[in-house]
Image (cartoon, grey):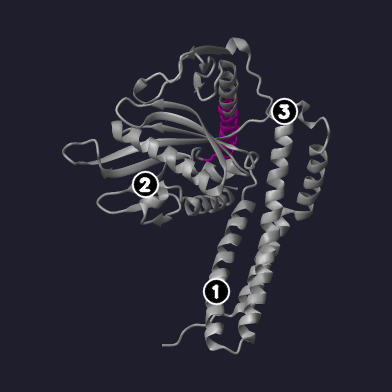
């Protein structure tokens, strides 16, 4: 049997070409200029006189530095790979050459994957793609199984954030009576969180033997996922006080039990649209109202964007809602599979997916969306 050999010099040339294309799109000089400007702002002696503004500056600086470091680290890894190839070729020991070759092939595969991830980031060029994300998960059809499924999805996104070292916070949870949740809203604070996670929006479907059915029957349940960009001061969403109804209540936990002795949780109703949001994770009523207001502004921002898009679709004669609804199926019985219904990407290990391993689904979704946008354009 002839074993195919890897042409390392050709592979390394290909890696360098891919990195050059990514660098061009990423505008490294612009990134360095942005870091210099933000570093100057961050070193101002009165920076923390305005904590909110200071937080934004330091966060943007951290994100920009992280982006530049990712690109520079990848260039260094490719250089190190070249050195590794040379060391392997220079060795007179066959066992050492074989071991070095095996190490080189593993690193080559790892760099390829890293470049794919960097390339996907360059596809995120939407108006709000670089912002933090707000994810709302709701139990839909399927009763207690749907509520349990919604909680599984909440954990999935939490674990995804943990795997990447991203900060996440659950802002509001409405618990179901028997098990699981009716709904939950969480924020994920990370570079390009909205652009990355926006492809998760739609209806998720779970097929399994219900743990809540004493006859052990197969159950299909559904949960909806909504992903919004976190609003910033520059968005200028004006909400008149007369358009708001504010209700306060005690925070509650699973089974309806009270977890607070004061009416600190806040529910906001936007009267003109009927949009309702609530927040109960902060300690004070004032903090919860501010957090709920940010969620409401995000929903109104998205509503305005959808209305603009609908107008454009009407002018183009396009079918609005082209990629929205049912988007992923999680099957635990009679076989094990998770499949994206838009991209056809699938894996046979649902446990790993529910444990936050969704990067391949995110990447294929982003590529699929870019292809669909180009086809529509």
Location of mark 2 (residue): 329
Q: Tell me the tag on residue 261.
A: none
Toward the viewer: 68 or 17? 68
What residue would you read off at disc 1? Answer: 103
Mark 1 Cα-neighbour bin, 10 Å: few <14, some 14–19, many ≥20? some
Labels 2 & 3 near each other (Cβ < 8 A): no
Mark 2 or mark 3: name the one nearer the start of the chain.
3
Magenta range is 299-318
Q: Residue furthest bottom?
A: 92
Quadrant in which the N terminus is drawn: bottom left
Q: Is residue 311 above or below residue 130?
A: above
- Taking depth in this image into account, of 226 and 105 the one nearest to the observer is 105
Q: Earlier in the sequence, mark 3 or mark 1?
A: 3
What residue is pinned by disc 3? 51
366 sits left or right of 75 in the view: left
Q: Does label 1 or label 2 sit earlier along the sequence?
A: 1
Q: Residue furthest left?
A: 215
Report the side of 22 relative to 183 (left or right).
right
Cα separation, mark 3 vs mark 1, equals 48 Å
Q: Is residue 362 above or below residue 23?
A: above
The residue sitting at 62% across, 85% down in the picture is 89
What's the residue at 76%, 29% (across, down)?
A: 48
| Contact between labelled residues 2 and 1, with CB atoms less than 8 Å apart | no
Whether residue 173 is visible to the viewer of this picture, yes or no, is yes
């Amino acid at each position: 049997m002839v074993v195919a050999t890897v042409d390392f010099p050709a592979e390394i040339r290909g890696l360098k070409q891919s990195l050059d294309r990514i660098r061009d799109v990423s505008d490294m000089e612009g990134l360095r200029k942005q870091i210099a400007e933000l570093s100057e702002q961050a070193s101002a002696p009165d920076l923390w006189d305005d904590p909110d503004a200071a937080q934004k500056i330091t966060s943007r600086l951290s994100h920009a530095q992280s982006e530049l470091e990712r690109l520079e680290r990848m260039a260094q890894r490719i250089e190190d790979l070249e050195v590794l190839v040379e060391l392997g070729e220079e060795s007179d020991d066959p066992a050492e050459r074989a071991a070095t070759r095996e190490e080189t092939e593993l690193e080559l595969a790892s760099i390829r994957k890293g470049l794919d991830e960097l390339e996907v980031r360059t596809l995120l060029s939407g108006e709000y793609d670089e912002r933090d994300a707000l994810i709302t998960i709701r139990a839909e059809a399927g009763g207690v199984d749907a509520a349990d499924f919604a909680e599984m999805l909440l954990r999935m996104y939490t674990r995804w954030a943990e795997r990447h070292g991203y900060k996440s916070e659950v802002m509001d949870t409405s618990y179901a009576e028997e098990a699981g949740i009716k709904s939950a809203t969480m924020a994920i604070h990370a570079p390009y969180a909205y652009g990355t996670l926006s492809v998760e929006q739609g209806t998720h479907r779970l097929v399994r033997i219900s743990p809540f059915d004493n006859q052990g029957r197969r159950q299909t349940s559904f949960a909806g996922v909504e992903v919004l960009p976190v609003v910033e001061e520059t968005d200028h969403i004006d909400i008149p006080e007369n358009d708001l109804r504010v209700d306060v209540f005690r925070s509650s936990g699973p089974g309806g039990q009270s977890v607070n002795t004061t009416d600190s949780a806040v529910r906001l109703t936007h009267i003109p649209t009927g949009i309702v949001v609530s927040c109960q994770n902060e300690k004070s009523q004032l903090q919860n109202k501010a957090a709920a207001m940010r969620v409401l502004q995000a929903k109104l921002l998205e509503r305005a964007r959808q209305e603009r898009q609908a107008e454009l679709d009407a002018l183009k004669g396009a079918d609005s809602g082209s990629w929205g609804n049912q988007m992923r199926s999680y099957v635990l019985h009679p076989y094990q599979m998770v499949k994206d219904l838009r991209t056809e990407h699938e894996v046979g290990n649902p446990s790993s997916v529910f444990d936050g391993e969704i990067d391949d689904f995110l990447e294929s979704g982003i590529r699929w969306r870019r292809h669909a946008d180009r086809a529509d354009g």
